[in-house]
Amino acid sequence: MKIYNIISGLFLSALVFSFYPSPTPPSKEIIKAFYVTQFSALVKSIHQLRTAITNDEPDKKVREYFLASRMAYKQIEFILEYYYGLDVNSINGPGINFVEEEDPLAFHEPQGFQLIESFLYPSYDTTKKQQVLQYIDKLYELTNGLSSNAASFQPDEYIPDAAMEELYRILALGITGFDSPAGHLSIYEAQSSLNSIGVVIESYKDEINAAGIKDYDLPITLIRKASRYLKNSTDFNSFNRMEFIKQYLNPLSSWLGNAKVKMGYADKPGRYGLIKKTSQLFAPENLQRNRYLYDDTMTIERIALGKKLFFEAGLSMNGKRSCAGCHQPSRAFTDGLQKASELDEHTSLLRNTPTLWNAALQRNLFYDSRKISLDHVITEVLGNEKEMNNGMDKAAINIQNRKDYKKLYKQAYPSSNETIEGSKIVNAIAMYVRTIVSYNARFDQYMRGNKSAMTLNEIKGFNLFTGKALCATCHYIPLFNGSKPPSYYYQESEVIGVPATTDTVNAVIDSDQGRYNIVKKDFLKHSFKTPALRNIALTAPYMHNGVYKTLEEVIDFYNKGGGKGLHIKIDNQTLPFDKLNLNTSEQKNIISFLNTLTDTSMLKIDSGVKLTVN
């Protein structure tokens, strides 16, 4: 496409592996020079964008300058995201209001590239010229300020780790369209991101050779081939993401992760990451299942105690309800009901029972994200008068004199006295729940090399899920929940406009205000945590209110454009309300793909603990 050639000439220069003459300077000098040069290009391109809008240049030209700015940003994204994370939200954050996890009362108003993009695509509304210029001025001021300090940036030993994060970001956020929701520029931009990875690898050539790492030419070849692939497949909807990931991103990530380890470079201390950056994103050994433990003394004995407690009805006030009463293993740790039952077994609770599969891999829990750890969730449920109505201390008293628990408790907490503590009950149950992990589905097996694990229609479904249907912009690969890559730390909450009933003619919004009940910000009304999709085929009914009985109904809801597509008046919907225009075959293929996320193999392990204590 012509627009690609324009941008390619401005910024890529046929891959910047020859950015520096031989002999190659030390790696840190190369990275610093690259950063300074590309930051200057970023500021210049933003200024050109502003000039084009000020001078009322044609829409096409305005969008060309916008894409040029985005391509320039993507060249140095790996540095900005890693070292200047607080500023990145203002440069390329979501075009919606969002709150901080640690401080829910602090929130960010939208600004930056994604917000500007919403004014320019699918067409530029010139009546909003001054508003666009206002946001461009903010972006220019910020980037120009950072540019003036660019020369003081000192690359350190974590540059390879930053490069690995960028590879994960390309896969899970880039090619899925997360940060280009209106313009669908992701395929173009991936070329710039990959180019920056090439610069990093080129700059470390001497160290790579000194470490005895073989096949130095492999990543360079992969990046060049990947760039050609992207150049020849720029249509967002038809782009074959599965092929691109399997042929290029996975082997490139595996090589760079291995090289990083062999060169002796570690992850940055204190920098969160649920998935280790030492191989491809789907490597099972890279999943840090215990990353969100507050108590990291996870033992088989504690898990065994927790498992018994999980099925213990004596923890409830009336002695009739256990954790497993609502989270039944045979029902994918749900109860199969539209809404959970109260302790009296007659009255319904406000919401549907969420699955416990992979609850350990999420930092925020409950539909309204009000608790940040499993321990906090269990404590609340034990004390909730409508659920267990007992509290952890009373629950401990209930089992204090039972010989079976005394023995297990002593084995689990040998340094404790004879009195069973409520906090230890919570701790043990939480440790058992942390073993309920699903990460070996057919999809995972296919990504790890088993070519027969998925059918052609299932692969088509994955490409739709990560492309045209925009599912992966909220349900991030590979966890398929709302934990944002590449750290998988920040848990997103969305407003999608879930109706109260299945009536599509006179649809009304469900009355549950969701996260707004916890954080009183208007933009959070009807906002709910993005749920995990692993084992989704087993967890019907769906949505926070259990309104939909089948996946077909769920896909139809999204295909119509969410609540707004049903003509529900909801001003703060974060789900794009344009119709997806998925045909019947495409919808079936997406559901076929979702079925490949089923994995209950953990239940077959006798103790349910050996795979998760690490």
Image: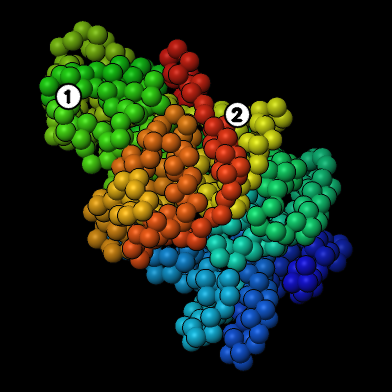
Query: Based on the displayed image, in which of its 4 quarters is residue 415 positioned?
Result: top left
Q: Residue at x 68, y 81 (%)?
A: 61
Q: Which residue is mark 2?
A: 442
Looking at the image, is 582 positioned above or below residue 314?
A: below
Looking at the image, is 470 positioned above or below residue 445?
A: below
Q: Residue furthest front?
A: 505
- The x and y percentages for residue 482 are 45, 47
> Is 164 placed left or right of 343 in the picture?
right
Q: Nearer the viewer, residue 26 or 101?
A: 101
Q: Which residue is mark 1?
A: 316
Q: Residue at x 47, y 31 (%)?
A: 537
Q: Secondary structure at mark 1?
A: loop
Q: Residue at x 67, y 79 (%)?
A: 60
Q: Which mark is on residue 530?
A: none
Say how the picture is coloured.
rainbow
Q: How busy is the neighbourhood of tag 2: few (under 14 within 10 Å), some, or many (20 plus)? A: some
| Marks 1 & 2, CB-CB < 8 Å contact | no
Q: Residue furthest right?
A: 22
Disc 2 residue type (three-letter): Arg
Q: Residue at x 44, y 49 (%)?
A: 557
Looking at the image, is 256 positioned above or below residue 77?
A: above
Residue 21 visible, this orientation: yes
Q: Nearer the viewer, residue 240 or 552?
A: 552
Q: Nearer the viewer, residue 341 or 424?
A: 341
Of the 4 image quadrants, the one containing the N terminus is bottom right
Q: Residue furthest top?
A: 403
Q: Secondary structure at mark 2?
A: helix
> Is 277 placed left or right of 341 in the picture?
right
Q: Nearer the viewer, residue 151 or 81?
A: 81
Residue 483 visible, this orientation: no
